[in-house]
Image (tube, helix red, strand yellow):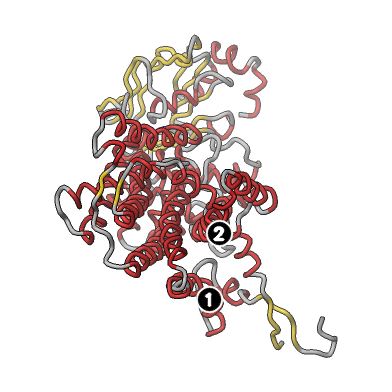
Amino acid sequence: MAGEPILSVRDVNKTFGGVKALTEVSFDLMPGDILGVIGPNGSGKTTLVNVITGFVKADTGQVLYKGKNLVGTAPHKIADQGLTRTFQVMRPYYSLPAYKNLIVPLFSPRARRTGGWRGGGRMGSRDTVAVDILEEIGFERESYVPYKTASSLPTGYLKRLELARCLALRPEIIICDEVFSGLSMSEMASMVPLMEKLQMEGITLIMVEHRLRELFRLANRVMVLNFGAKIAEGVPVEVMADKQVKEAYFGSEEVFSYV
Amino acid sequence: MPKAHESRRKERLDRGVKVRSDGVYAVASWREMAFLLGPRLLLIAGLLIMPLLLMPVPYWQKVLTIICIYSMLAIGFDFLAHYVGLVSLGGALYIGVGAYIAAILNTEMGLPLWATIPLATVLGGGVCTVLLWPCLPLRGVYFAIVSLMFPLLAARLIEAFDIFGGTDGIMGLDGFPNRWSEMYVLIICLLLALFALRQLVNEDVGLVFRGVKDNDQSVKASGIDITRYKALGVFIASSLGCLGGACLAHIYMWAGISQFALDFSIIPIAATVVGGGGTLAGPVIGCLILVPISELLRDFGTLRIAVYALILMAFIVFKSEGLMSYGARKYNQFEHWVEI
């Protein structure tokens, strides 16, 4: 893996009151990679996402994106540079039709500069581009799914809508906060090829997950957090074999029988 | 009910419109056109004819101008509260700032009335936005409390430092040439503001505003600066208020601290409750009901407030959706016979 990392997190610390949410977390992310972040509940995964995307300010440490430190930058400016995220708890605009949800990101300065995913925004109206993006990530246009109200859509579509919101910005990195959680087996099965497709398109991904089977199939590298500290990092096979990881996260070896 | 051999059925008037399109009007016949335009034309024509109908009673013509000023505040409040997510109790600030700017421009700089009103609208909107800028990160009841404080503070500052004429206010403004011009300027401004805002909230930029209200985290994550949009929302709402305030100052030919009175903060909210929040036209209807009621109740003295409160309570308990939402729902349920 040659070249410069696109995102590099250096010794990030964050405490909430007396609780150490992140302790000296560091990692590098190469362009085009899929990095999996796993860890037990409360291990600091979502805090890490919040620190990288500017929703929470790190106490110390650096988040270098293309060599520039992002700590202290407002969330909207970070998104404007192409570093986007999804939310673990989906936050669509429930009262609007699904495709109208994408008008907001398509109206952002970045989308107007880049034209949205694949630059379609330079040609069509925002409504058209929004429906195109949704169709491409699995909203069946023939059944009018893009036109349905967001509140009437099942979880699987809402997770995709979160992804679509990121894609509308034509991002370079998407940080997916648990896109697989709450999905049925079939919804998950159709999500995996979608993530692979995004990787093929050249988008770098960080996936924070509890679903190990799907994650290990997708990720090039996996990082394990426990009590806010990184305890292991490497290719999935290595991490699986790590004794510390097994003890901290899995408890027993049986988990691996189906991976 | 039609008998079995009849070849017709009852159908909702808006069926054709609803079936063909969702929100985008694909109008096919004069009947549908009339169905859609009817209520809008009723409001426009009603407001334009009202001054003529009230000709025999000049006192009520004055009330009509006050209704228009309150209406402008109320649609500003409704827009901010239901489309930008800022509950602003600063209506009195907008009126006061608009009135004082118009007064200063008119008496000190000698600008004529047709220049002071537009200038006070824009400058006043700017002043109010700058004043409220530090409070924009606040949400919900916190923003409401801080915005309520501003008009009170402004009135006390003017009183304490004896600036802008102190407790006497600024006197000697030009009045409108006649009472017709004052009524029609206000009515036309109100109608323009109402239809412009209704258009704005359905445009793409309006969706961004609604996004800020529904869920600002997601808007931030979409690379949009929410503070800028909140400020823009405040500017729009406060400009409407300042326009009202400037007109008020010219009508009374005086600007004083009573224009920072709490009435200007409270009545628009009451009107929005009565008329129906989020409809923009509802608050206008609310003002058309509430302001005359409060005039009629003047004879009751202090009991006025009690009666007023009862009316408000009745609305909140029995018709909390507001008149406009209720009316729109019923209007869309009209049926007619259709040949099969």
Quarter of the image with the C terminus of chain B in it:
bottom right
Report the residue at 38% width, 42% height from top. Answer: B258
Q: Chain of mark 1?
A: B
Q: Is residue A217 above or below residue A99?
A: above
In the rendered structure, which amino acid carries the disc numbered 2? Ile
Question: Is residue B225 shown left or right of residue B279?
Answer: left
Report the residue at 50% width, 72% height from top. Answer: B25
Q: Nearer the viewer, residue A163 or B187?
A: B187
Q: Nearer the viewer, residue B69 or B253?
A: B253
Residue A118 seen: no
Q: Chain of mark 2?
A: B
The outermost residue toward the right is: B4
Q: Earlier in the sequence, mark 2 or mark 1?
A: 1
The outermost residue toward the top is: A18
Residue A64: image x %, image y %? 30, 25
Q: Nearer the viewer, residue B22 or B329?
A: B329
Per the model, the C-alpha gap separating discs 2 and 1 is 21 Å
In the rendered structure, which amino acid carries the disc numbered 1? Gly
For label 2, the SS is: helix
Quarter of the image with the N terminus of chain B in it:
bottom right
Residue B228: image x %, image y %? 33, 42
Q: Nearer the viewer, residue B261 or A79?
A: B261
Disc 1: which residue: B38
Q: Nearer the viewer, mark 2 or mark 1?
A: 2
Question: Is residue B206 shown left or right of residue A178?
Answer: left
Disc 2: which residue: B289
Residue B161: image x %, image y %? 26, 29
Image disc number at residue A20: none
Crowd rating for badge 2 (residues with CA inside 10 Å; few <14, some 14–19, many 20+): some
